[in-house]
């Protein structure tokens, strides 16, 4: 399968409150060479304006690794 040496997700989020969900305002995908950004969003189940928390970020990472397309996935916000 396709393997990407490094993929870096920068999810820039607006904090709605300290312990509540946050909202994804912008999605920036870096390092992908062979897979389209839209495909990555679909496999990761990532949507702009989506409310997200730490558990959902872990699920995004798990979903992307389960494709076996990626060698390294990093999500930051």
Image (cartoon, rainbow, N blue to C red):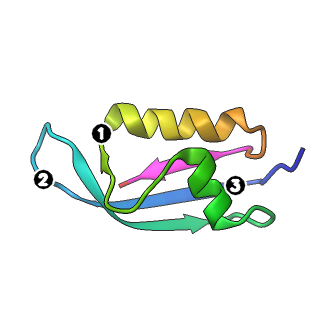
User: Are the residues at dot 3 and dot 1 in contact (C-beta closer than 8 Å)?
Assistant: no
**Total tally of numbered discs in the picture:** 3
Q: Is residue 18 above or below residue 24?
A: above
Secondary-structure class at tag 3: loop
Residue bearing mark 2: 16
Assess disc 3: are there few (<14), some (14-19) or many (≥20) residues with their C-alpha within 10 Å of its C-alpha: some
| Residue 36 falls left or right of residue 9 | right
Please tell me whether residue 72 belongs to the stretch shown in magenta.
Answer: yes
Can you tell which mark lies on residue 8?
Answer: none
Assess disc 1: are there few (<14), some (14-19) or many (≥20) residues with their C-alpha within 10 Å of its C-alpha: some
| Residue 4 falls left or right of residue 9 | right
Locate residue 20, reporting x and y percent: 15, 39
Locate residue 73, reporting x and y percent: 61, 46
Q: Residue at x 33, y 53 (%)?
A: 50
Locate residue 22, reporting x and y percent: 23, 50
In which quadrant is the C terminus drawn?
bottom left
Residue range (magenta):
71-76
Q: CA distance from mark 2 to mark 3?
A: 30 Å
| Residue 74 falls left or right of residue 58 | right
Outermost residue, left side: 17
Q: Is residue 40 above or below residue 61?
A: below
Q: Residue at x 12, y 53 (%)?
A: 16
Q: Residue at x 26, y 55 (%)?
A: 23
Residue bearing mark 3: 6
Residue bearing mark 1: 53
Viewer-side residue, 49 vs 65: 49
Closer to the observer: label 3 or label 1? 1
Secondary-structure class at tag 2: loop
In which quadrant is the N terminus drawn?
top right
Secondary-structure class at tag 1: loop
Residue 35, quarter of the rendered image: bottom right
Among numbered discs 2 and 3, the one appearing first in the sequence: 3
């Amino acid at each position: 399968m396709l393997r990407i040496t490094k993929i870096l997700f920068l999810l820039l989020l607006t904090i709605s409150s300290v312990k509540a969900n946050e909202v994804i305002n912008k999605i920036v995908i870096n390092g992908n060479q062979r897979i389209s950004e839209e495909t990555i969003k679909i496999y990761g189940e990532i949507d702009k304006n989506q409310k997200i928390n730490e558990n959902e970020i872990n699920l995004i990472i798990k979903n992307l690794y389960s494709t076996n397309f990626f060698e390294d996935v990093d999500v930051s916000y």
